[in-house]
Amino acid sequence: MRRTQDAPVIQGLVAGAVPPSEQGRVQGSLTSLLSLSAVIAPLISTGLFGYFTTVAPLSIPGAPFFAGALLMAAALLAMVRLFRRYPPPPFHPPNLGGDRGGAGLL
């Protein structure tokens, strides 16, 4: 259950984490996963909604949203573990001043 506005953010984070020679492979894999989730998520959500509004002993119409929240929490924990294992590379700001010793764009 992802939102479409999240995809550019995810792609930007991933793009900064891999070398230029791997960009195509990683972006293709990421797009495949996002597309697969766009197909599977509605099927799972519809099934959960149907079960928890008709068959289940307890009626929970918001079950798909609870499931999405649990999946997002699990993804957050996985990302925290991943970022602890692989810290980001050091940031080196560009020299916008050129030859002027960092005078900036003044």
Image: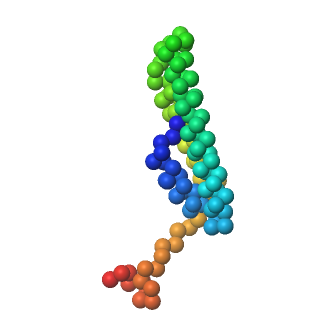
Seen from this angle, which residue lies furthest top? 57
| 64 to 95, vertically: above or below | above
Q: Residue at x 54, y 13 (%)?
A: 56
Q: Residue at x 55, y 43 (%)?
A: 76
Residue 81 visible somewhere in the drawing: no
- Judged left or right of residue 1, residue 84 is right
Question: Based on the displayed image, in which of its 4 quarters is residue 105 positioned?
Answer: bottom left
Residue 78 in percent (x, y) is at: 61, 44
Front-lying residue, 59 or 91:
59
Q: Position of residue 54 (x, y in %)?
A: 51, 13
Give the residue displayed 67% in from the left and 67% down from the top. Answer: 21
Task: Please say whether residue 13 is visible from this viewpoint.
Answer: yes
Furthest toward the left, the residue is 106
Q: Which residue is farthest bottom?
A: 99
Count numbered badges in the picture: 0
Quadrant of the image for the C terminus? bottom left
Q: How is the image coloured?
A: rainbow
Quadrant in the rendering for residue 96: bottom left
Residue 1, given in percent of the width and then of the height, sits at: 52, 36
Q: Residue at x 38, y 81 (%)?
A: 104
- Asked whether 69 or 28 is in front, the reply is 28
Q: Is residue 66 above or below residue 77?
A: above
In the rendered image, the vertical position of residue 68 relative to residue 62, given as above or below: below
Q: Position of residue 77 (x, y in %)?
A: 58, 42
Q: Is residue 68 above or below residue 11?
A: above
